[in-house]
Image: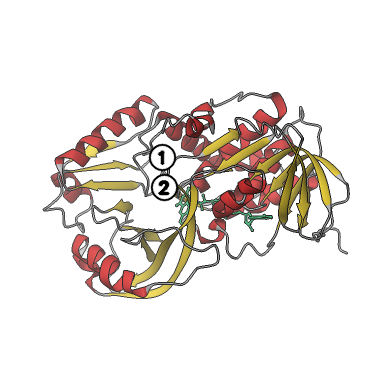
């Protein structure tokens, strides 16, 4: 076995922290824990598929934005921008660590009615109070700055060019994984198939792996993405998260635009953006059910009937385009309030959620990983107060609605 290969058998029978899932969130939590000098426990990351082929992480569009309706979500993304821009510093000035490509071409939310324009104006106030550079634009201002849009039906736009756009989240993922392992976190290729609670039901005592091994755990972290419900149920817990399909299409334009296309959220529900010399577009299906964990079948009628007509209407120059690539991925969709579910369960106290990111998880991974590591190490959040995302709100039926979900 080479030094860097991953075994399927844990070295020990007990770990302080067992993380179920080793993709973006599992690796973020593992790295922030392993990097914290105040944490001296052992970490096991159990990942069933080291190719990550069917993860949300592999299907992401990898963008970040400040434009959220909740202050805490703005602040979470501001930390993402800080983390990405100072990545090597955060990684201990390791000279092997590269700069993370970050292309800040902004987001542009378009409102075609007064009610949604008002939502944008209210959200802009929240963002501006956090120091974000979002501004509300009239149709004329949008036309002036981006002449390619057809905006005759548009009441207002919300736009920000600072710390919004594409970032190479895979670089974060790769280095978190690599560095966490170098700092002592153990990754195994295996699957958690069951959990055993103590007699009082207040703790998960152990997890059982597909290979049959039983691993005693101090804390268990659910970082299993769209399979979060299946993992929670092993501990007898229900959460309102389900896999929902999201379609991404890459296309080339016969006449490319003369400037970057901000990530534009069209009133039709279709979004599109610059993607190098290509363009990317996506949308939810009109009928948006929970899907099977293994259902990644592409639906080209969505491109033909919904995406292409919407983008060609909004940008007439996109009449002549050619589809070059596409994929279907899964959101871990929080049906309760479309926000993250974080922190401990109310009764099974050593079961920690990092779930339900509903399409904005990539950018949330630095702040949520850091916060979860703080919670495990100190029993409290030390930097950003992430308690609004607590599971308790679900148990108490107190939705914490995020209006800006794409
Ligand atoms: C099409 C699409 C576009 C997106 N665009 C953006 C964007 O622009 N910006 C943004 O911020 N976010 C975006 N997201 C969301 C973001 O990609 C996800 O929130 C993030 O990748 C979730 O990471 P995760 O680690 O929670 O889940 P996953 O990446 O799904 O990882 C879960 C891991 O758990 C493993 N696992 C599950 N069960 C078990 C088990 N029992 N035992 C062992 N291992 C297990 C799986 O194999 C998997 O590796 C997008 C998502 C999609 C699908």
* Residue 194 image point, x, y percent: 72, 51
Q: Nearer the viewer, residue 355 or 235?
A: 235
Q: Nearer the viewer, residue 14 or 45?
A: 14
User: Which numbered circle lies on residue 45?
Assistant: none
Q: How is the image coloured?
A: secondary structure
Q: Which residue is mark 2?
A: 104
Which residue shows up at 68% across the image and 49% down it? 20
Q: Earlier in the sequence, mark 1 or mark 2?
A: 2
- Judge whether 131 appears above or below 2 on screen: above
Q: CA distance from mark 1 to mark 2?
A: 28 Å
- Judge whether 144 appears above or below 351 on screen: below
- Judge whether 78 appears above or below 143 on screen: above
As drawn, is 84 to the left or to the right of 318?
right
Report the number of numbered marks. Answer: 2
| Residue 22 is at least partly visible in this image | yes
Quadrant showing the N terminus = bottom right
* Residue 12 image point, x, y percent: 88, 47
Residue 371 occupies which quadrant of the picture? top right
The 10 Å Cα crowd at callout 2, few under 14, some 14 to 19, many 20 or more, is: many
Residue 137 occupies which quadrant of the picture? top left
Mark 1 touches mark 2? (CB < 8 Å): no
As drawn, is 91 to the left or to the right of 394?
right
Q: Which residue is mark 1?
A: 337
- Judge whether 381 appears above or below 241 on screen: above
Secondary element under disc 1, as helix, strand or loop, is loop
Which residue shows up at 56% across the image and 36% down it? 342
* Residue 143 image point, x, y percent: 17, 50
As drawn, is 98 to the left or to the right of 262?
right
Which residue shows up at 37% across the image and 58% down it? 288
């Amino acid at each position: 076995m080479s030094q860097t290969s991953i075994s399927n058998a844990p070295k020990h029978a007990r770990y302080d922290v067992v993380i179920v899932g080793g993709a973006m969130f599992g690796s973020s939590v593992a790295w922030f824990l392993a990097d914290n000098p105040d944490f001296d426990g052992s970490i096991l990351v159990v990942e069933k598929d080291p190719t990550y082929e069917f993860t949300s992480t592999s299907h992401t569009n990898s963008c970040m934005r400040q434009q959220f309706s909740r202050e805490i979500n703005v602040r979470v993304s501001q930390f993402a921008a800080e983390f990405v821009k100072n990545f090597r510093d955060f990684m201990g000035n390791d000279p092997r660590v590269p700069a993370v490509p970050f292309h800040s071409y902004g987001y542009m939310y378009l409102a075609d009615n007064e009610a949604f324009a008002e939502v944008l104006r209210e959200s802009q106030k929240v963002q501006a109070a956090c120091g974000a550079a979002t501004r509300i634009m009239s149709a004329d201002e949008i036309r002036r700055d981006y002449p390619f849009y057809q905006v005759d039906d548009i009441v207002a736009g919300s736009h920000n060019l600072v710390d919004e756009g594409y970032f190479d989240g895979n670089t974060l993922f790769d280095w978190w994984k690599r560095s966490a392992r170098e700092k002592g976190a153990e990754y195994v290729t295996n699957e958690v198939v069951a959990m055993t609670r103590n007699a009082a039901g207040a703790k998960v005592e152990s997890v059982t792996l597909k290979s049959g091994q039983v691993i005693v755990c101090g804390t268990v972290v659910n970082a299993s993405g769209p399979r979060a419900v299946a993992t929670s149920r092993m501990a007898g817990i229900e959460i309102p998260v389900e896999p929902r399909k999201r379609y991404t299409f890459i296309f080339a334009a016969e006449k490319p635009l003369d400037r970057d296309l901000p990530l534009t959220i069209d009133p039709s529900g279709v979004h599109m953006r610059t993607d190098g010399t290509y363009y990317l577009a996506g949308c939810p299906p009109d009928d948006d059910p929970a899907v099977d964990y293994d259902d990644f079948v592409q639906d080209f009628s969505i491109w033909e009937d919904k995406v292409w007509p919407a983008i060609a209407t909004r940008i007439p120059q996109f009449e002549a385009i050619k589809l070059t690539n596409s994929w279907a991925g899964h959101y871990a969709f929080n049906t309760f309030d479309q926000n993250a579910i974080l922190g401990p369960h109310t009764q099974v106290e050593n079961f920690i959620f990092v779930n339900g990111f509903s399409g904005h998880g990539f950018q949330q991974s630095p702040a949520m990983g850091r916060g979860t590591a703080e919670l495990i190490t100190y029993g409290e959040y030390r930097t950003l107060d992430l308690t609004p995302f607590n599971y308790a709100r679900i148990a108490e039926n107190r939705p914490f609605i995020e209006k800006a979900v794409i």
